[in-house]
Image (cartoon, rainbow, N blue to C red):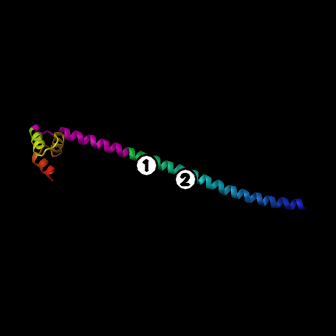
Amino acid sequence: MEGAADEGVERVVDSKDMQQQSKAFDKLTDRVEDRQLDSTRVQEAMASIAASAEADWNAMRMRERELAAVKINAADVDIIANELELDKKVAERTLREHKGDAVSAIRYLLR
C-alpha cells in the first residue's frame, strides 16, 4: 500500500509540473505572437513611410515641372542677380516661384 500512496503523490507532483510547464509554454508562445504582431506593425509602418516618400517625390517632380514651365525674362534674372548680389540660379528660381513677376520676386528676396 505504501507504493500505491507514493504513486498518488507522484501523480500530483507530475500534475503540478505539467501545469507549470503549460504556463511557461503559454508565456513563451505569447511572446512569440507579440513579436510577430510587432513585426507586422513594423512592416506596415515601413510600407506607409515608403508610400509617403514616393508621394513626396512625385509632388516635388510635379512642382519642378510647373516651375520649369514658367516663362521668365533673362534680363530680369540678370538684374535681380546683379542688384541683390545673388547667384543667378537663386534669382531664376525665385523668379519662377513668383510666376515671372520681378517685383514680387524682389520683394520676397528683400524680406
The label on residue 45 is 1
**The image quarter in which residue 17 lies:** bottom right
Residue at figure coordinates x 69%, y 58% from the top left: 20
**The image quarter in which residue 7 lies:** bottom right
Q: Is residue 52 magenta?
A: yes
Residue furthest out toward the front: 85
Mark 1 closeness class: few <14, some 14–19, many ≥20 residues within 10 Å: few
Q: Position of residue 35 (x, y in %)?
A: 54, 50
Residue furthest out toward the right: 1
Q: Position of residue 53 (x, y in %)?
A: 35, 44
Residue at figure coordinates x 31%, y 45% from the top left: 56
- Region rendered in magenta: 51-74
Q: Amino acid at mark 1?
A: Ala
Residue placed under numbered mark 2 in the picture: 34
Q: Position of residue 102 (x, y in %)?
A: 10, 45
Q: Quadrant of the N terminus?
A: bottom right
Q: In the picture shown, does residue 11 fall above or below 79?
A: below
